[in-house]
C-alpha cells in the first residue's frame, strides 16, 4: 500500500488474521481516502475529486465482505495417499463493472487416472471469449490427453511429449474460433468477400433461431490471455502453458517455515523485448507491426486466444464482423489498425510451455503454485514477493483459527490489498463512479 504522509487518512495498527473478533472501527465520522492510497495503477487524480469517502469496517466485516464480493471456491480430493487442493476467486469491487476474468479448476479423469487442471484467463474487449475459454479449455485438454494415453497404451509419456500435446491443444482450440465462422461460408473468406452484406447478415444474425452462428462470430471479436497448469496423476510433473500477461509463481518450503520464491512465467507484451523482436522478425518490412509497444498499435498482449482481427486478413473483419448485429456503427478505431494488417497473424496462440519436475518424496515440505491475472500483480507492484511471504507467515501463525482455515486465494488477496481492515475497507467501500481496481483472479494450488 502507498500512503501519503502529508494527507489526512484513517489508519490503524496492523492486526493479525488470527484475531477475527477484534474491532478496528473508529468513532470518527470523517473517513477519507486519497487516490494514491488505493493499490494498483488504474486509480488516478482524474477519477473524480479527492479525497473520497469510504466506510471503515472492522476485521470480521471486512473479511466477510471481501469473501462475499470475490466468491471464493475450493476443489480438493485425496487419492492414493496424495492430497490435492486448489482455491480460487474473482474480485472486482466496483459493482457496476462486470469482471472479464475467469478461472478453471478441474479433475480430468483419463482412463481411471486423475490429472488436475487449473487456469486463469484475463479477457479483454468483452467477456464472450474468456467465458468460452474457461469452459471449453479443460474439455479440449482432456480430449488430447485421452488421445495421447490411447496412443501410448497407458504407458508413461515423456514430459516433452506432454508439453507438445499441451501446446497443440491450445493452438487447436484457438484455430477453431475462426474456422467455425469460416465454415459458415462454403469456400471460406474468398467466397464471403463476394457476397452482398444482406446475405452475410442473414447467415450470421440468427438470434431469433437460437443464435449459434451469431455466438460463433462474436467469439472472434474479443480475446483473452490464458495461463493453464496441468499436473500428472502421480504429482511428479507440472506443465504450465502461458499466453499473455498472467503470472505463475512457485513457492516451495525449503525448511520449516522457510520458503523459496520463483516466478515461472514471462509476460507477452511490449515490456518483453524478445516478444517485440519476435513479431518484428515475423513481419519484416512492416515498421507498424508494433507501435508504442502494442500489436499494430492497438492491443497490448502479443499472445492470446481469440482477437481474430489480428490473426485473419482484414477482409475477415470488414466482411464478417462488421455485419454482426448489433455491431459497431463507428468502425474507425478498427480501421486504424486494419490498415496495418498486411501479413497476419500478428498475435500468436502458441503458448510458452514450461515443465517443472515435482518431488513427491518431499511430502512433509509444502509447495504452492499461484496463478493470477495481472490485476493482482498490479496491486502488489514491486512488493509482490513480500505480500506472498506475509501470506505464508499468516497461514502458519493462524493455523486452527477461523481465518486460518479459509480459502488460500482469499487470504492472499487480503494481504495484496494491504493486509489490514482499513486498507481492505478503502478498496471495498470507496465512493467512486468508475472502477478503481483492475479485475483480479487468483488460483492457489497445493502440490
Image: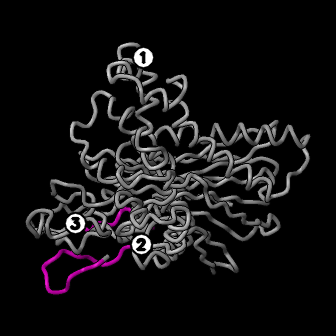
Magenta segment range?
Answer: 2-24
Q: Secondary structure at mark 3?
A: loop
Residue linked to disc 1: 210
Check if residue 8 falls in the magenta segment. Answer: yes
Q: Residue at coordinates 34% horizontally, 49% vertically from top-left?
A: 69
Residue 96 left/right relative to 187: left
Residue 258 against residue 299 in the figure, above or below: below
Residue 403 against residue 68 in the figure, above or below: below
Give the label on residue 16, or none.
Answer: 2
Residue 266: percent from the left, percent from the top?
Answer: 55, 69
Q: Work out whether residue 77 or residue 237 is closer to the camera in this orientation and state it.
A: 237
Residue 329 against residue 392 in the figure, above or below: above
Inspect this view and state whether residue 338 appears. yes
Kindly report the distance in space between the C-alpha atoms of the residues bearing marks 2 and 3: 16 Å
Mark sitting earlier along the chain (2/1): 2
Residue 418: percent from the left, percent from the top?
Answer: 35, 71
Foreground label between 2 and 1: 1
Residue 183: percent from the left, percent from the top?
Answer: 54, 26
Inspect this view and state whether residue 19 appears. no
Contact check, label 2 and label 1, Cβ < 8 Å: no
Q: Residue at coordinates 48% horizontally, 62% vertically from top-left?
A: 245
Q: Secondary structure at mark 2?
A: loop
Residue 435 left/right relative to 444: left
Foreground label between 3 and 1: 1
Check if residue 17 falls in the magenta segment. Answer: yes
Give the label on residue 25, or none.
Answer: 3
Q: Residue at coordinates 35% horizontally, 47% vertically from top-left?
A: 125
Q: Secondary structure at mark 1?
A: loop
Mark sitting earlier along the chain (3/1): 3
Amino acid at each position: 500500500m502507498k500512503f501519503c504522509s502529508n494527507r489526512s487518512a484513517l489508519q490503524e495498527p496492523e492486526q493479525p488474521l488470527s484475531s477475527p473478533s477484534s474491532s478496528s472501527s473508529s468513532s470518527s465520522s470523517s473517513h477519507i481516502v486519497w487516490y494514491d492510497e488505493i493499490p494498483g495503477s488504474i486509480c488516478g487524480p482524474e477519477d473524480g475529486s479527492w479525497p473520497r469517502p469510504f466506510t471503515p469496517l472492522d476485521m470480521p466485516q471486512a473479511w466477510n465482505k471481501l469473501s462475499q464480493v470475490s466468491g471464493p471456491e475450493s476443489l480438493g480430493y485425496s487419492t492414493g495417499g496424495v492430497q490435492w487442493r486448489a482455491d480460487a476467486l474473482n474480485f472486482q469491487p466496483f459493482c457496476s463493472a462486470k469482471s472479464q476474468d475467469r478461472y478453471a479448476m478441474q479433475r480430468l479423469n483419463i482412463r481411471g487416472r486423475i490429472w488436475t487442471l487449473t487456469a486463469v484467463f484475463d479477457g479483454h474487449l468483452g467477456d464472450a471469449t474468456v467465458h468460452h475459454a474457461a469452459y471449453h479449455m479443460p474439455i479440449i485438454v482432456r480430449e488430447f490427453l485421452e488421445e495421447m494415453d490411447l496412443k501410448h497404451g497407458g504407458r508413461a509419456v515423456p514430459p516433452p511429449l506432454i508439453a507438445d500435446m499441451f501446446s497443440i491443444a491450445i493452438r487447436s482450440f484457438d484455430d477453431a474460433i475462426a474456422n467455425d465462422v469460416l465454415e459458415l461460408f462454403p469456400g471460406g473468406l474468398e467466397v464471403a468477400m463476394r457476397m452482398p452484406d444482406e446475405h452475410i447478415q442473414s447467415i450470421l444474425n440468427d438470434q431469433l433461431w437460437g443464435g449459434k452462428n451469431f455466438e460463433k462470430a462474436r467469439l472472434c471479436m474479443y480475446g483473452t490471455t490464458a495461463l493453464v497448469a496441468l499436473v500428472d496423476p502421480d504429482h511428479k510433473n507440472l506443465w504450465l502453458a502461458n499466453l499473455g500477461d498472467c503470472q505463475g509463481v512457485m513457492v516451495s518450503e525449503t525448511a520449516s517455515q522457510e520458503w523459496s520464491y520463483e516466478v515461472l512465467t514471462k509476460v507477452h507484451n511490449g515490456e518483453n523485448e524478445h516478444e517485440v523482436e519476435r513479431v518484428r522478425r515475423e513481419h519484416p518490412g512492416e515498421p507498424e507491426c508494433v507501435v508504442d509497444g502494442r500489436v499494430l498499435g492497438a492491443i497490448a498482449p502479443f499472445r492470446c486466444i481469440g482477437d481474430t482481427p489480428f490473426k485473419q486478413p482484414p477482409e475477415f473483419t470488414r466482411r464478417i464482423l462488421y455485419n454482426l448485429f448489433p455491431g459497431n456503427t463507428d468502425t474507425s478505431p478498427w480501421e486504424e489498425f486494419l490498415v496495418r494488417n498486411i501479413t497476419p497473424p500478428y498475435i500468436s496462440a502458441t503458448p510458452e510451455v514450461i515443465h517443472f519436475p515435482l518431488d513427491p518424496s518431499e511430502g512433509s515440505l509444502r509447495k504452492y503454485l499461484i496463478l493470477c491475472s495481472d490485476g493482482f500483480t498490479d496491486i502488489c507492484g514491486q512488493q509482490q514477493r513480500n505480500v506472498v511471504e506475509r501470506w505464508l507467515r499468516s497461514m502458519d501463525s493462524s493455523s486452527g483459527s477461523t481465518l486460518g482455515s479459509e480459502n488460500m486465494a482469499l487470504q492472499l488477496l487480503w494481504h495484496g490489498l494491504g493486509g489490514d481492515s482499513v486498507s481492505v475497507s478503502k478498496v471495498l467501500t470507496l465512493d467512486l463512479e468508475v472502477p478503481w481496481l483492475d479485475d483480479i483472479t487468483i488460483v492457489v494450488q497445493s502440490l
